[in-house]
Amino acid sequence: MYDTGKIMTGLAAFLVMLTLPFWYSAATGKAGERPDPVLPKTEKKCVESRQYMRDYHMDLLNRWRDAVVREDRHIYVSQDGTRHEMSLNNTCMKCHAERAQFCDKCHKYLGENPFCWDCHLDRKGVM
Amino acid sequence: MDESRRAFLKTAGCAILGAGLAAPIAAPIASAVAGAVSAEAMPGELKAARWALVVDVKKCLQRENCRACIDACHVAHNVPLIKDPAHEIKWIWKEPFKDTFEAEAHPYLEKELADKQVLVLCNHCDNPPCVRVCPTKATWKRADGIVMMDQHRCIGCRYCIAGCPYGSRSFNWQDPRPFITTGIKPEYPTRMKGVVEKCTFCTERLVKGLAPACVEVCNKVAGPGTMTFGDIRDPGSEVARMLKTGFSIRRKPALGTEPQIFYLV
Amino acid sequence: MLEKALHGSRRYWTLIGFLSAVALVGVVAYLKQLSAGLVITGLSRDVPWGMYIAQFTFLVGVAASAVMVVLPYYLHNFKAFGRLAILGEFLAIGAVTMCMLFIFVDMGQPTRVLNVILHPTPNSLMFWDMMVLSGYLVINVLVAYVTFTSENKGVHPPSWIKPIIILSIPWAVSIHTVTAFLYSGLGARPFWLTAILAPRFLASAFASGPSLLIVLCLVLRKYTKFDAGEEAIRKLSEIVTYAMAANIFFVLVELFTALYSGIPEHKHHFEYLFIGLHGHNALVPYMWTSQFLAVTALVLLLIPKIRTNFKYLFPICVGVITAIWIEKGLGMVVTGFIPSPLGKVTEYSPTLLEGLITLGIYAGGFLIITLLYKIAVSVREELEA
């Protein structure tokens, strides 16, 4: 074929870039790393089940936000019937008081930067 | 360009555009609904048909250098202290009588009154022009009359500021956090740069059965009667009684905004 | 057809390079604004809108003025505008793009701009502004594309484009009327609360837009083989004359109501503009320059011997554009906020970064116009060869 040298070099570079996440993590020793959020010591039950919160906490918070701010509604009835005040500060942060210990752990691992903290503060006043 | 190559590029472009537009519609809006939002009120929550505030100007003027309401509000809501008047943020403050009530100020007014400082804040109008112009409903009128702000929705277009005849609204020209000097209150969020803010009649306190911060501290410091907050549609409320028995004015009534801050003069 | 923009003379590439460089500087300046916030502008609590919104207002007029070419040509078969039509449409595309960019850079939270579509609010004029501007862009791109490719192929454009072209006529009027309504419905700003604002906007648009088109045609005449035609340019200059006359008349009419009634609320703004208010007079020299340019331009335009001489017409049109740019781009927006609702005068002047972002957007818009005009010119040159 024409330009074999250029094409092969390009292909090689492409493959290196494509597999970058794998060999870079292996090289820096972070391959097996998992996020380790610090769970609350006293409370064992969250507003909803752990799996639900893992999957949908963003949607839940959005619904709470719209309900509290826009509809002036403040009580949430969980799937298991318990009532909670819809409040990041008064409910979520009552147990997950420090974002650096909980929220940030998974978010940093995923490179996720939610803008909640542009305005909201955790219980310790950390922005 | 080759016709078939051109046709391919056109089709590919349209396909990507179509997929991009269709994806959010086609993808199931997943949030396996678990619990439900309830319409119950919080214990002790204050409710009204129509919230209003009555300011007794004469009583307020007796304490000329008092800033209790201003400080209480700004501290409770993490309002930044920005000294540059071009970028300052204020929810409640004082203005000279002659500027607040242009129609009532005339050249022969007792000289002292013209320059006396009158309390001004968002009037929570019944016919709010700011709500009419907001393109995203980031500000709207609640059923109880409070003109509310949703800083999550605000795009920072400042149309509401242009529409407000009272200058009640402030824009965050920069990140306000470095300017919050009075000790941040974690239980109330700050705001981000690029959104508008103003007095919200302390909705977060009404939910807990508390009067707005300004009213509470004024009653504590100056006694009852200077600032009175209540349901104007409730004939038995203090605000209704005060308006029936005293002479009250509002700011710029000719504009038809129907402000709900009444000034007893 | 697009490849025509990729081949050009040295002069062409120099222009492209220059405009790209200015646009790039604007982008860098905007990144600074994104990170620091709108605090880097000269805007303030009392004057929340300034240079960006003023440029948007001026350019909506330029975009709408395409109707002054489309109406005679497509509705009344004024054949002389045949070669001009595509230039008018391309100018409209560039102008609308600049309008949207100016609004975008003015937003405090630009990433949330789609909220206007996600949460439509028909009572807000800003919602309608976004809708009509987007629609106008789509219409102009579609019409320009279909008519020009048909011409390139030497066939008549398909019949379905005709109703869309006719639609663009009221649509053009609507974009500037909606923009005027943005201002003229606000009881809070008595300077803008006047029914004549929309007619004023349209009159000044139909003077400044065709003037810009004349300037561009004369430039094309000088540097390319594209000649829009004597008759076309002369007709445009007549349109500018009538529009300018209407515009000046509207200004005088406004001045009369404000000054004769003597109502402070109305008077104050014109005082600020022409003699200064409470010692603040930053805009006074600009306003008098604008009126002087406008009246001089009109007087000269009314003299046929001068109007038909393109050597004089060029600077006169530049004068018209400058006069209206000052009136709309500087005078109109900021004065609405002076004095403030509490009677204070806070003046406004743009900062360097604000100016760089503004120039960057102008450069970007003119880059688009240059590229599109290059295509039009090259295709026409080929067709006529």
Image (cartoon, helix red, strand yellow):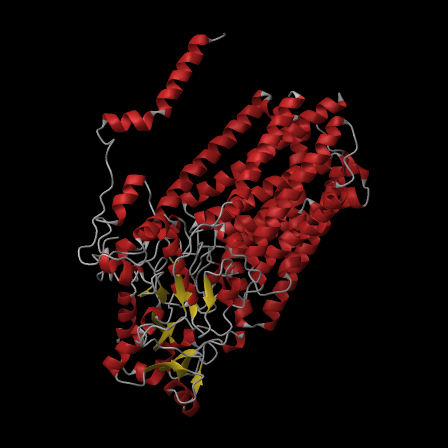
Tell me which residue sits at (67%, 22%) in the image. Answer: B3
Q: Quadrant of residue C218?
A: top right
Check the image and name the residue furthest to the front. Answer: A80
Tell me which residue sits at (26%, 74%) in the image. Answer: B68
Check the image and name the residue furthest to the bottom. Answer: B245
Task: Please provide percent x and percent y for residue B5.
Answer: 62, 23
Q: Quadrant of residue C174?
A: bottom right
Identify the image quadrant of the N terminus of chain C.
Answer: top right
Q: Is residue B97 above or below residue B195?
A: below
Q: Quadrant of residue B73?
A: bottom left
Q: Is residue A67 above or below residue C228?
A: below
For residue B166, side relative to residue C205 (left or right): left
Task: Please provide percent x and percent y for residue C303.
Answer: 75, 45
Task: Please provide percent x and percent y for residue C363.
Answer: 52, 36
Task: Please provide percent x and percent y for residue B180.
Answer: 26, 58
For residue A49, side relative to residue C343 (left or right): left
Inspect this view and state whether residue C326 appears.
no
Q: Is residue A80 above or below residue C381?
A: below
Viewer-closest of C44 and A43:
A43
